[in-house]
Amino acid sequence: MPEITFDDLPQILKENKEIHSEIHIAINDYLQNFHLKGWNRIDGAKKLIEQKNYLIEAPIDDLNFGGFIRSTNTDKLICYINSAQPRMYQNFIVFHELYHLLHNFTKMEKFHFIEAGLDHRNEERKADYFASLLLLDEHELRSFFSGSANENESLYTKILLCMNTFKAPYKAVLIRLYELNLIKFNELKMMFDKKIDFLEEFRRLGKDTYILEPSNVINFKGLESLMEHNALPAVAQTSNMKVLEDVQRFFSGPREENRLK
């Protein structure tokens, strides 16, 4: 959520309250019935997407763009994640897309684009809140933030440590801490639009900076699987090749000029 500002918060907090019960039910359902046992939440979500749909990852040098979901001529969907995003944002995007895949994406939509910043559409707020609650589990976050190991740390340092531990974006952490009454509104306001060199701060704390960096993963196994397992009949293969050409074109040049239609 890199472009959200403090001015956006009243609307976000209001909408989160309205959908709180619904999203908690969705999360409990996911963890009980869909999450792969033995996997951590992030890797388990990606593996589930791979099993149920076609996951692709590749870098696009546009940090306002997180990913997309695209329908195919099969009952599976293509789910793309921009691996040029810092890993903490990729994690958020994975859960955001997972919500749509589990709950409300229909083939009639054909495309669903995920971009940075505040989206007032109800289903987008639900997907963002779903991602936030999955990344920042209430009991784990309370325990970590208020634990004795961090009691001598400053509030600012504890927030950075939460980012590192939960692999989550700074502003998502702040909102979650406030909603759990772990920080006060004036603290939220003071810190929300603060300009921070996270790389420098993580190094100061002696923490690995990998969550702040892009992975630049290139993974087209999902498309290769689509071609391999849906080669017949000829009409279907023609449709699949069109999907592949569309996606290849999308990655071949500037996004606005090659935007999929």
Image (spheres, rainbow, N blue to C red):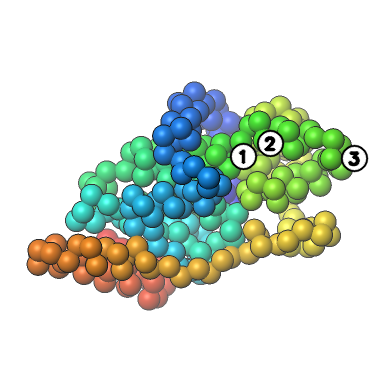
- Disc with the residue nearer the chain's start (2 vs 1): 1
Q: Residues within 10 Å of mark 2 (few under 14, many from 20)?
A: many
At label 3, the amino acid type is: Asn
Above or below, 2 relative to 125:
below
**Do the numbered discs 2 and 1 sit on residues whose CB atoms are within 8 Å?**
yes
Dot 2 lies on which element? helix
Direction from residue 34 to residue 205 in the image, left or right: right
User: How far apart are the alpha carbons under marks 2 and 3?
Assistant: 17 Å
Nearest to the observer: residue 144 or residue 3: 144
- Disc with the residue nearer the chain's start (3 vs 1): 1
**Do the numbered discs 2 and 3 sit on residues whose CB atoms are within 8 Å?**
no
Image quadrant where residue 198 sits: bottom right
Q: Residues within 10 Å of mark 1 (few under 14, many from 20)?
A: many
Residue 62 spot, x, y in % from top left: 50, 65
Image quadrant where residue 186 sits: top right
At label 2, the amino acid type is: Leu
Residue 116 spot, x, y in % from top left: 51, 53
At label 1, the amino acid type is: Leu
Residue 71 spot, x, y in % from top left: 27, 53
Query: Is residue 111 visible in the rendered structure shown here?
Result: no
Q: Mark 1 highlights which residue?
A: 136
Above or below, 122 relative to 206:
above
Residue 117 spot, x, y in % from top left: 53, 49
Q: Mark 3 highlights which residue?
A: 152
Q: Mark 2 highlights which residue?
A: 141
Q: Residue at x 79, y 43 (%)?
A: 158
